[in-house]
Image (cartoon, rainbow, N blue to C red):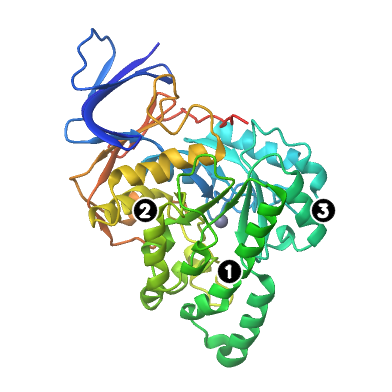
Amino acid sequence: MKRLLIENGEILNEGERYVGYLLIEGDRIVEVGRGVFAGEFLGERIDAAGKWVMPGVIDCHVHFREPGLTEKGDIASESAAAVAGGVTSVMEMPNTQPPATTIELLEQKYAIASRTSLVNYSFFLGATNRNLDQIGRIDPQRICGVKLFMGSSTGDMLVDDRSAIASLFAETPVPVVAHCEDEQTIRENSARFRASYGDSAEASIHPFVRSAEACYRSTAAAVELAARYGTRLHVAHLTTARELELFDKGPVRNKKITAEACVAHLWFSEDDYSRLGNLIKCNPAVKTAADRDALREAVVSGRIDLVATDHAPHTEAEKHRPYWSAPSGMPMIRHSLQAMLQLASRGLFTPEMVVEKMCHAPAAAFAIRDRGYLRKGYRADVAVVDPKTSERVTRENIYYKCGWSPMEGECFGSTVCMTIVNGKIVFREGQFASGIYGERLEFDR
Ligand SMILES: [Zn+2]
């Protein structure tokens, strides 16, 4: 059995930081210790002096575009970008082509991932107005959750039938993850802005079209329904200060209703539309600097339970269309950890807090089995980060199939040196291992 000893680094785990070592045998962690490893060791020693050793990031909100939209990205390309950013597990959304709205279509995605994904994976089943029968077929230990688009522009998967929504909240045996924006409000706003701006509209109107009011209405409705039915609800990508009032402070463990913030909404504000335009057009929209600051504070207070990316690549050509026809979403997974550590370095929160929100909390929120922490007996999913070597974002080190990032030109103060998935080194100093694939996540439910 292959053995790895990562020594001399600073372990960042479970709220603590100390110089220590990590001993891995096969795909499991067998020891996490303080100080110097004193025993006998035969295997590969990795000197992590000056580096941080932390659990790999678990990103519970990504769009890898396969099947059907592979001109934008695919599981192989986007999972490579993920490991290069210290991510070891992802949960992927159902708005692929065809949408993953039956157990059979969902299992096809698992089959593709088993052959091509560099990270561990799980896939959400998409809820529609008509597929409650499929929700009854879910194996809660093998499927991460059900994605509900409450009034967003996602075609088939927009669930707007009241009795379908009520049944879904009452009966789903896994977390319901909701995208909350009120469709009626957005339609009215769109009509108004089309009338005033026509084809000359620019991305800066996006936070007014997909307004704070649209977010609040839909999020409030989802939280109210979850409280009524006792649903395990996770609200994706909060973007406004006002919505935060609807959520309790931490800790995440044992909460029935949890909330997510995405890196883009913690990083950008409406001031960035003039520079980046449609590149940062996403749903829900990037909003004001005050909203962004409230989200950052909520990461600390615990009203935001976890941080994900909503990694959603589109081609550059698509993003360069006029505002109304440019698709929403941006790629982010490659730099999510570095961006959050950058915010930490500015004193907004601690690196330990970043580990809590990106590694531990996603595992807790979804009850992922044996991952998300550096613990004896857990799966060896590990990121090694150099907190002192900076890295500039260039097209050469993005690795996305779409080839661009809204972070281009940014210089982060940290670098991801190594990513270990299931005890195997899949990324090291800019190089990827070949022929090593992640595993299907399992859940303790
Ligand atoms: Zn999304």
Seen from the viewer's position, the closer of residues 16 and 272 is 16
Measured as percent of width and height from the top left, residue 264 is found at: 42, 61
Circles 3, 2 touching at the beta carbon (< 8 Å)? no
Identify residue type, mark 3. Arg
Q: Ligand 1 shows up in which quadrant of the image?
A: bottom right
What residue does disc 3 label?
Answer: 130
**Residue 230 visible:** yes
What residue does disc 1 label?
Answer: 216
Circle nearer the viewer, 3 or 1:
1
Between the C-alphas of marks 3 and 1, the distance is 26 Å
What residue does disc 2 label?
Answer: 300
Q: Is residue 377 left or right of residue 192?
A: left
Residue occupying image coordinates x 17% and y 35%: 50
Name the quarter where the C terminus is drawn: top right
Circles 3, 1 touching at the beta carbon (< 8 Å)? no
Identify whether 179 is placed above or below 9. below
Identify residue type, mark 1. Tyr
Measured as percent of width and height from the top left, residue 321 is found at: 52, 74
Q: Is residue 407 left or right of residue 63?
A: left
